[in-house]
Amino acid sequence: MQIDLNCDMGEGYGRYVLGNDEAVIPLVSSVNVACGFHASDPSTMRRTVKLAKEWNVAVGAHPSFPDRVGFGRREMSASPAEIRDDVIYQLGALLAFCKAEGVPLRHVKPHGALYNLAARDIEAATAIAAAVRSVDPSLYLVGLCGSAMVAAARETGLKFAPEAFADRGYRKDGRLVSRKEHGAVLDDPEVVAERVVRMVRDGEVITVDGTGIPIDPKTVCVHGDTPGVVALLRAIRSRLEREKIGVKSFSG
Amino acid sequence: MQIDLNCDMGEGYGRYVLGNDEAVIPLVSSVNVACGFHASDPSTMRRTVKLAKEWNVAVGAHPSFPDRVGFGRREMSASPAEIRDDVIYQLGALLAFCKAEGVPLRHVKPHGALYNLAARDIEAATAIAAAVRSVDPSLYLVGLCGSAMVAAARETGLKFAPEAFADRGYRKDGRLVSRKEHGAVLDDPEVVAERVVRMVRDGEVITVDGTGIPIDPKTVCVHGDTPGVVALLRAIRSRLEREKIGVKSFSG
Amino acid sequence: MQIDLNCDMGEGYGRYVLGNDEAVIPLVSSVNVACGFHASDPSTMRRTVKLAKEWNVAVGAHPSFPDRVGFGRREMSASPAEIRDDVIYQLGALLAFCKAEGVPLRHVKPHGALYNLAARDIEAATAIAAAVRSVDPSLYLVGLCGSAMVAAARETGLKFAPEAFADRGYRKDGRLVSRKEHGAVLDDPEVVAERVVRMVRDGEVITVDGTGIPIDPKTVCVHGDTPGVVALLRAIRSRLEREKIGVKSFSG
Amino acid sequence: MQIDLNCDMGEGYGRYVLGNDEAVIPLVSSVNVACGFHASDPSTMRRTVKLAKEWNVAVGAHPSFPDRVGFGRREMSASPAEIRDDVIYQLGALLAFCKAEGVPLRHVKPHGALYNLAARDIEAATAIAAAVRSVDPSLYLVGLCGSAMVAAARETGLKFAPEAFADRGYRKDGRLVSRKEHGAVLDDPEVVAERVVRMVRDGEVITVDGTGIPIDPKTVCVHGDTPGVVALLRAIRSRLEREKIGVKSFSG
């Protein structure tokens, strides 16, 4: 039994630093690398790919709407064609750094508002899947368990890695509790670790209403910018170890 | 005997149109496609690559300093590492559209102020050459005949295509007359066409001082944004035809 | 009896030209000047303000969502505070050019997707009105007749200039026919001119369904980027003249 | 006897934080507020102006070359007209937030590469001075003691506040030691504090060569992003107090 732990990475920009990539990367098996639209810049991308290579974690692209000041968290009424082309552009930019550093690119996971849109909107999800396929059909698409992205990946003929969130509350319909509502974020490392084990071992997550719903993630996301992320990741890993669940990239 | 005719292309941006790509592309054998830093955007890049595919012309990347409002024409004191990473980023972005459209990428030609800097500064030229090599060592680098880029390509182990300018005045030292000075731009189609033939057939160009200097281009650039570019290109092609000089991409 | 004719202006960017400001400006009484977020740049703004001064037309700011590649036509889920601050920023930038050229700033009209959002969303409309008021409470706000902007201006204590569109189809509820639907745009100069007269003289516009609805504009917008805009404006002015309706800025 | 202590402020961007404005602002008498070209965004500008109001420090604009990824530290070959218009734009944007918060704008100090260019290039310095004058002739221009900016301000008819750097090494010609060289930055708080006193009380600074040169600053800059800035400022203030030198904005 095994699971992938993923984290967004390389989200600095120019002089600006965000998160603590060096501390987080030893504890995850996959990273989603920002591509310059919501965060990052060419030199930050290179450094991040190098860091991933050093730690031998799987590298994925983390494309976004073009909204740096809003950190890609604001939905934009972009057309499917615009979304597709924006994803191709960002994917290619990261691919070039992977080539330059001799690191394979493994997956694509949309960022922020684009992720959320793709989770509920099949047109947007399909645009993203089509973009990925047109550049490299061997890449995995990563998206929310049970969302529109599952269907988009299947119809496009892409491999899909369903994702769960370690530290986020779930609703009965399988979607995440909005950050504006109570129960959106969990921060007790032991509670979060137990939750991850339950997802992976038992295929279940307890919703904010207290009922269990089925969930079957191939990868579990931990947010790199939450203050206690290192303690959280350590608790998760130690709990997984006790259960003899390996931590390994889904992409091989 | 043959020569390549190249033109910058895809330099629109969002709603903005620049040049007349549809009219120019039938008359050239290579195009340099803007990559989003001085001009273009993802959807414009896709359209431009598609157009190049339709006309079966060789596609190259046209990376720039990050200066959209200045159209990449303002020199910036960027470090060699920044230049290298900026070129990798842009190159990768275009490569992804080439893959998506099934078109090979053939060459890289820096744009505007970056071109001029690389012509005289071996550090900048080497940064560009290193960037290209790290992404795809089979690509050609395109740069000014007799400039620092020749040495940079040689030392990096890249193929190089020396370039001459059909409609620009030359100084005795082989550099271009500054656009601020008299004799910088030639606009009589017959004069320009004759000049191109002389460059290709005789390996010579007449400078603003009236003396001939040796020149040995593999590709001749015509600026797509000069008003009479279509007439200019027609004159050049008809003159080349009379001399039985073929027009064909240097990259094969 | 009189009416204001307004047109968006200064929507070039760097090397890029859009519209034909020199041909249009003699025919209007107010201009809405782009402020750098969807179009324009500092030097274009200066030129546009100078042009407005030359022709003695009333100058307004035309703030937008920050989306240059999408020309401000894509709605973004920005917060009211973000909208307010973005408007203050743009307004201030234009004000500085007005000061530098000795031209008064008269009004503010949101652009594109921000205009449409403000027409239906009172929170967005209020954020814009609050921004304007905080910078200069003597400015007019310009917005769609009968929209949420009317209430926002009233509650904020701003003067309001209700706007009608000369060349756009109207629905029975007073909103514009979407550009994706039939009847969205009218292009016959005589039809458009007649329509403007009816709006101004009779306070009525005929909807796509053929029924008349009341309308009471203080300003009528003509889009500067429609191909036949000069002919359209001439037809409107000549028709207004026949009716002895003066063309004059609402703000002055 | 008195002196102004100034610090750059509001240099975050979107989600990104830089420096520790809250800790620094109680210790200075003037702040230079970033205007969105090298750092900051509309909402950060508003917050920074509010903070300055709370602490009753003098507010200045801190305009830059348009280079966010390079933090305005890369020189660009912009024309004087471009520099002038870029400064007007940024100045106006900040002025609008000052109006919205009821805070007067007092001065303008160019940032980074633009500051350095203006220190040695009279054309650039004059472009900046002309920009400031055209927007508000009562503003102070802040620039390096003994630099080209002195002449530019005088010729333009602007008030000028010559600036010294508390923690930077000086050369015999009065310019700063380059950050690439030894002796560029001083970090011992007592040494720096003593140095400031010497500048203000004795009108002298000791260069890296050990000789004293005359200096007559109206304002002394401390960099907000140096790690020990708070300790540094405390040492300076306590040393100034002992000498009965007041800390007060030069602008009144």
Image (spheres, coloured by chain):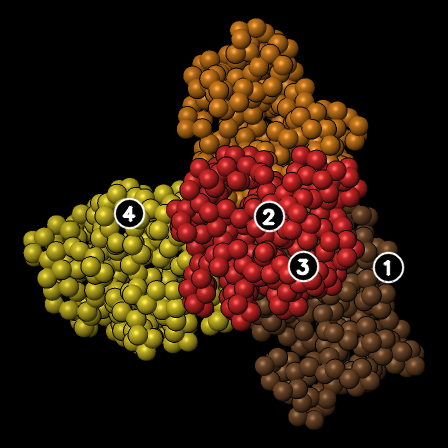
Chain colours: A orange, B brown, C red, D yellow
Residue A184 or residue D93, whichever sits in front: D93
Q: Quadrant of residue D22?
A: top left
In space, the residues marked 4 and 3 are separated at their CA atoms by 56 Å
Q: Is residue D22 left or right of residue D110?
A: left
Indicate which disc residue C243 carries. Answer: 3
- Say what secondary structure mark 4 lies in: helix
The disc placed on residue C217 is 2
Q: Residue B55 carries which label?
A: 1
- For label 4, the residue is D52
**What residue occupies the far bottom of the structure in this picture?**
B210
SS at mark 3 in the image: loop
| Residue found at x 49% / y 56% | C251
Give how far across and how far down residue C173 sits, in percent: 67, 34
- As drawn, B197 above or below A183: below
User: For the residue labelled by badge 1, is the local secondary structure a helix, a strand or a loop?
Assistant: helix
Q: Which of D36 and A201 is in front in this view?
A: D36
Between the residue at mark 4 and the residue at mark 2, the CA separation in whole angstroms equals 43 Å
Tell me if I can see residue C23 in this picture: yes
Q: How many marks?
A: 4
The mark closer to the camera, 2 or 3, is 3
C-alpha separation, residue under disc 3 versus residue under disc 1: 56 Å
Tell me what residue is drawn at x 26 percent, y 43 percent: D54
